[in-house]
Image: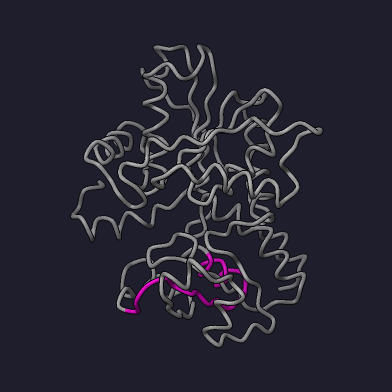
């Protein structure tokens, strides 16, 4: 397909914005909404659709026919890139951190079914080498190849996430007081922050152990020329790093219980790696009085639901 056709196919209607009734919020005079980006596409859902959209358009504009990207063995970004390539006419290659024995899990099986080819490298190489250097170390031919960074973290991805804010404001009829999202690379949070009106705040719930993510968001905003707003340093975003439940892909019984209870009550499934932690955090913050009375809070459902299958295979059928 040509660039115009790809552009048309990537113009999804806005994802639904659902009202959630819950006493944890109602008792404090708060209004809670969920932005259902998990419904954008069956396989390229949530923030992965947002982050890939403008990257795909740029790849097509440059005449690239192959997408090369990087990630772990259970990476949502890897599966989304594989599905996007299959859907929109790009061949795909994923460089996976770890041993080839990690192949065979549901995420990589799905990527292979979408036609993605896989290469494996050491975690040290993935951590220490640039994408281009890593590709050269594996003798990967980069002709007509578009490089997507690990997690899809770049300025084009931020642009897609920024567009979601405009949708939310149109659906609410006004800017929300808070938009909260799970954070892995910080790209979604950075994109939201650039799109918010002056009085709105973006909350990023880190799913990673440690306090380094704030600097990653600052770097993204700086690299993409979005660090300031009318000359003033942006202060409309915050990273909260106390809700990781032990670190990336770690979990607690309380988190699993919350995910199952939330689905039973609302019909909305959450994954235990990203969205479950973000939503859990928002409910805890509401109980603690973090949000001012009368505030409107939008929780972004960033997708990642395919990760539930792998989680249940590893730990038992915990997520209902």
Residue 67 vs residue 130, the one in the foreground: 130
The residues colored magenta run 81-100
* In this rendering, position of residue 199 left or right of residue 253: right
* In this rendering, position of residue 267 left or right of residue 189: left
Residue 133 percent across, percent down from the top left: 59, 77
User: Where 249 sits versus 74, above or below?
Assistant: above
User: Where 169 sits versus 142, above or below?
Assistant: above
Residue under the point 43% across and 70% down: 124
* In this rendering, position of residue 7 left or right of residue 181: right
Residue 245 percent across, percent down from the top left: 31, 41
Residue 2 vs residue 236, the one in the foreground: 236
Residue extending farthest to the right is: 230
Give the mark count: 0
Residue 235 percent across, percent down from the top left: 65, 30
Residue 132 percent across, percent down from the top left: 62, 75
User: Is residue 143 located in the magenta-colored stretch of the structure?
Assistant: no
């Amino acid at each position: 397909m040509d660039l115009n056709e790809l552009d048309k196919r990537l113009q999804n209607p806005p994802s639904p914005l659902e009202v959630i009734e819950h006493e944890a919020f109602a008792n404090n005079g708060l209004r809670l909404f969920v932005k259902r980006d998990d419904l954008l596409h069956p396989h390229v859902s949530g923030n992965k659709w947002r982050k890939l959209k403008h990257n795909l358009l740029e790849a097509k504009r440059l005449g690239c026919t192959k997408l090369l990207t990087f990630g772990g063995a259970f990476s949502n970004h890897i599966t989304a890139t594989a599905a996007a390539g299959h859907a929109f006419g790009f061949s795909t290659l994923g460089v996976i951190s770890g041993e080839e024995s990690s192949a065979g899990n549901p995420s990589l099986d799905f990527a292979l079914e979408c036609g993605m080819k896989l290469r494996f490298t050491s975690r040290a190489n993935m951590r220490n080498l640039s994408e281009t250097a890593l590709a050269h170390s594996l003798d990967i031919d980069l002709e007509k190849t578009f490089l997507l960074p690990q997690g899809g973290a770049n300025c084009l991805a931020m642009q897609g996430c920024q567009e979601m804010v405009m949708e939310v404001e149109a659906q609410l009829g006004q800017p929300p007081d808070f938009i909260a999202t799970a954070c892995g690379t910080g790209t979604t949070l950075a994109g939201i922050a650039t799109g918010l009106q002056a009085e709105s705040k973006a909350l990023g719930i880190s799913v990673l152990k440690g306090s380094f993510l704030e600097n990653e968001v600052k770097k993204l905003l700086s690299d993409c020329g979005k660090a300031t707003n009318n000359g003033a340093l942006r202060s409309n975003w915050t990273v909260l790093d106390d809700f990781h439940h032990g670190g990336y892909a770690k979990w607690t019984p309380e988190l699993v219980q919350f995910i199952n209870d939330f689905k039973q009550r609302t019909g909305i499934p959450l994954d235990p790696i990203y969205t479950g932690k973000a939503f859990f955090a928002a409910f805890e913050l509401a109980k603690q009085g973090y949000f001012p009375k009368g505030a409107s809070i939008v929780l972004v459902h960033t997708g990642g639901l395919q990760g539930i299958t792998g989680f249940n295979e590893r730990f038992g059928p915990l997520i209902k």
